[in-house]
Image (cartoon, rainbow, N blue to C red):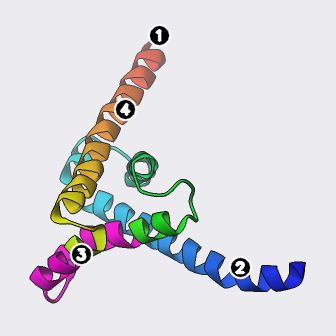
Amino acid sequence: MKKLLLILLFPLFLVACADKNHYEQVVLEEMEKEKDIKDYKIDPAHMAKCVIDTTYLNMPGFFAFDPDRLQAYRNYAKMLTLTKEKDPKKTLEELRKEFGSPEELAKAHANYTESIMNCYTAIMHEQDSEDGQSKT
């Protein structure tokens, strides 16, 4: 019985990891393109981790492999790659449906944007603290 349960859950786990990893990769790619990150000499991987951790807090679902969270990973990744789509207008309509409404899509975009701003503040504060400690 335990083996059967493990066999049934293993593919779900693999798909969940793939969705989560894809979202993380998309965020990292966005951070690598961000001009302010380069200007402030912030490590894109560090910024991406912060943004990912912060957006997770306001995503649907209670834990990493919750079906609602898995759908959120897919939706957020699709939202962030909207401009790369062949038909962005069609993709935007799909996103509105997948998020449940245009308002929910706007909330997700606001969550992502606020996460970026909060991470800028936190990382710049970290850098200032490190600079202050190294001068003493």
What's the distance in space between the residues labelled 4 and 2, CA to CA? Answer: 38 Å
Q: Amino acid at mark 4?
A: Ala
What's the distance in space between the residues labelled 2 and 3, CA to CA? Answer: 28 Å
Q: Amino acid at mark 2?
A: Leu
Residue 65 found in image quarter: bottom right
Local secondary structure at mark 2: helix
The reply to whether discs 4 and 3 touch (Cβ–Cβ < 8 Å) is: no
Looking at marks 4 and 3 on the same chain, the residue that comes earlier in the sequence is marked by 3
Q: Is residue 122 magenta?
A: no
The reply to whether discs 4 and 2 touch (Cβ–Cβ < 8 Å) is: no
The residue carrying mark 1 is 136
The residue carrying mark 2 is 9
Q: Which mark is residue 97?
A: 3
Residue with the most extreme bottom position? 86
Which residues make up the magenta segment? Answer: 74-94
- Return the residue nearer the eye: 25 or 103: 103
The residue under the point 42% across, 21% down is 129
- Return the residue nearer the eye: 132 or 15: 15
Q: Amino acid at mark 3?
A: Lys
Looking at marks 3 and 1 on the same chain, the residue that comes earlier in the sequence is marked by 3
Residue 3 vs 108, above or below: the answer is below
What's the distance in space between the residues labelled 3 and 1, CA to CA? Answer: 55 Å
Q: Is residue 85 magenta?
A: yes
Looking at marks 1 and 4 on the same chain, the residue that comes earlier in the sequence is marked by 4
The residue carrying mark 4 is 122
What's the distance in space between the residues labelled 1 and 4, CA to CA? Answer: 22 Å
Residue 35 vs 76, above or below: the answer is above
Task: List x then y, in percent, for residue 76.
Answer: 33, 66
